[in-house]
Amino acid sequence: MKKNSDARWDDFDPESYFKHNYDELRYDDRFILRTVRDYFAKAVPPGRLRGVDVGTGSNLYPALALLPWCDQLTLVDHSARNIAWLEKEVKKYGPAWDVYWDELVRAAPWREVDSPRDRLAKISQIRQGNVFDLPRAQWEIGTMFFVACSLSTDHNEFKRAVHSFLNALRPGAPFAMAYMENSEGYEVNGHPYPAVPIGVDDVHLALTERDAYDIKIDRINSNHLRAGYTGMMVAVGRTGDPD
Ligand SMILES: C[S@@+](CC[C@H](N)C(=O)[O-])C[C@H]1O[C@@H](n2cnc3c(N)ncnc32)[C@H](O)[C@@H]1O
């Protein structure tokens, strides 16, 4: 078994991860982006919220999905290299993210954001941190993509990561999470990283154990570009009241 603390997160190569996964918008990420866009557009009333994306890595599309609502957006990651990449990238994000934004601006809340580059640079706070040590009830909207499933081989750590993320949001906060389905682990520039094989039932159980509600979970078949998993899952909903 490989625990989260066993993996070499500071060796995680953000540039290689970005090139492999996000340099081009694939249909599975497009599906996830549309699902999150449509849920947030329906579920979140206009307002100025404090948002968080946990385990951001070198993926900015969850942050872009949060942009219309947030006047503060905290991006948390464990890896020093990912933090350095984020510090640079959010100052003026690269053109690869425009195609992701083009999917979002099909819905009204994103169309009202004048300049997403400037806005992301203005509202982002980048923090090196640990999903297992997040403060409780801190944020009012949140995302966590491909983190709980992809930080260890330990099923308990998967659940603890989901619960810790949900606990970090205020009761009733809308959230979106993405997961690999049945992942056997992954490599980033030759370094192995652990994953836990989970499916829709595991995600549903982890969410309901913390009384999340309004839950919708969709799965997408793997496009076979990357071996070692059977698909992706996207879950949206609202956090329950822990008390
Ligand atoms: C598979 S990557 C996902 C990155 C990105 N969110 C995405 O959608 O592609 C897993 C991420 O989780 C981060 N991570 C691993 N352990 C963590 C922990 N204990 N707390 C916070 N982030 C962690 C890694 O640094 C990495 O950025």
Image (cartoon, grey):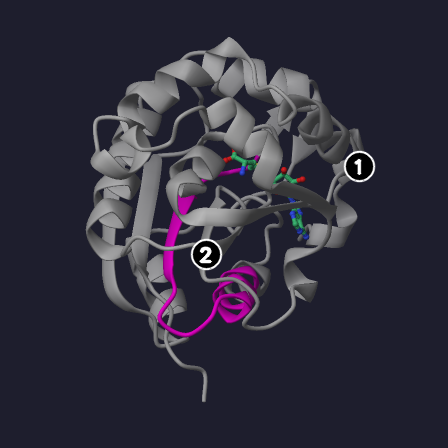
Instruction: State the residue position of label 2.
Output: 49
Relative to 19, residue 171 above or below: below
Residue 15, horizontal then vertical, whole percent: 66, 17
Task: Give the distance between the C-alpha atoms of the residues marked 1 and 2, in whole angstroms.
Answer: 27 Å
Q: Residue at x 66, y 44 (%)?
A: 125
Q: Is residue 51 left or right of residue 84?
A: left
> What amino acid is at disc 1?
Ala
Q: Residue at x 60, y 22 (%)?
A: 17
Give the magenta part as a residue range: 161-185
Q: Residue furthest bottom?
A: 243
Residue 111, horizontal then vertical, whole percent: 28, 29
- Callout 2: 10 Å neighbours few (<14), some, many (20+)? some
Assign ligand 1 to one image quadrant: top right
Q: Is residue 150 left or right of residue 135?
A: left
Q: Residue at x 60, y 35 (%)?
A: 122
> What amino acid is at disc 2?
Leu
Total residue callouts: 2
**Callout 2: SS:** strand
| Quarter of the image where one finds residue 171 | bottom left
Q: Residue at x 74, y 43 (%)?
A: 7
